[in-house]
Amino acid sequence: MNSGAFPIAAIIVIFSASALGALQTGNGATANQSAAQEERVFVRGKWLSRSEYLREQERRRRPEETGIAPLAGAGDETRAGSGGANASFVKEGANAASSTPKEARPVEDLTALTKIYRVGVGDVLDVRVLNAPPRNSESTLYTVLDGGYLDFPLAGPPMIVAGLTTEEIAAKIAGELRKRAVYEQPLVTVTVRAHMSHTVIVTGLVNEPGAKVLRREAVPLYVVLAEAQPRAEAGLATIISNRTGKTTIIDLADPAATTMLVFPGDVVNVAPRPPAFLYVGGDVNMPGQIDFHPGMRLTQAILAAGGARSSSAIWVKVSRQKEDGRLTWTQYNLLAIMDGVEPDPELRPGDRIEVGRRRW
């Protein structure tokens, strides 16, 4: 028997001291009267009176009146009514939700955050009811208080607005004004007069360090750096994300990298680029290690090494280390580069350059 369900048939048990005595003495009338008073049903580990048992049966036949759908497997799936169907639907829905792969779930569109602003504590809002009678002595500016509340008296008690856009706040205020019959068709506008809740901290090699205000939920790094004004020696930006806790290093010489989004609470530290070098050898006047600068070309590196020692030294081999540690090399004709026939290749930190008179 399923312990979670009532049996189809119940055994009515007559168990009473007075009834038992009446049976023993053969007093049938007394026995019937006692049985009517003391009938009990043993169900799910406890004794119930007949009336309690009937009420419980009726309740389980009509689960919609209790507001609780019976769980699948409770033994009532075959009963009339909507209980069994609801239980099956709930169970199937739960299984479908739990089996949904993570890849199928919607991914947050971060680029959309560059187009919206959600109000926060400390922001100053300009709230106006356009079709209300003018009130010259009353200010239209309201500050979002601690806890995210906005105290707009016409709309009743302070309401929570933190995390909402200005359009959502305007709709919320208009709804309260209609609800309280202040105005039948209120035209409400809300704008942010002072952005105070969204900031990014910028430190390091910048002329204007400190907190930088964001007027969107996310902005590209180059927007923040433009306000902070990096110094000439700045080369890298380290972003400590408030959302994920991760640290990302951005090369400021890479325009694509500076489009990375920063969010409220992030910390950006601007630092100099670590020293990098090239190594030039072979038929040059000053072989050895030279400083590398972003965007350096092959002819520039050879000139930094004193230039070729002979006009016949026209072949150049550039070796570069791959991620697995092995070297790969490319051969260039210096005369063809100087004459503009071939492009002057861009170098990378750690490149090895050899100048010679013969092909490799």
Image (cartoon, rainbow, N blue to C red):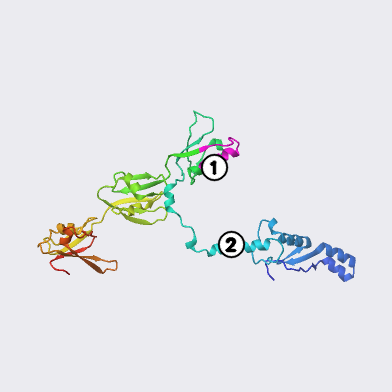
- Alpha carbon distance from label 1 to label 2: 33 Å
Type of amino acid under label 1: Lys
Q: Quadrant of residue 68?
A: bottom right
Q: Is residue 217 visible?
A: no
Q: Which residue is mark 1?
A: 172
Q: Which residue is mark 2?
A: 93
The percent position of residue 225, horizontal first and vertical second, equals 32, 47
Residue nearest the viewer, comparing 38 with 344: 344
Q: Is residue 198 magenta?
A: no
User: Can you say which quadrant of the picture contains the C terminus?
Assistant: bottom left
> For the magenta stretch, what is the residue range?
169-188
Under circle 1, the secondary element is: helix
Residue neighbourhood size for the residue with mark 1, other residues' Cα within 10 Å, grouped as few (<14), some (14–19), many (≥20): some
Q: Which mark is residue 266?
A: none
Q: Quadrant of residue 346?
A: bottom left
Residue nearest the viewer, comparing 264 with 294: 294
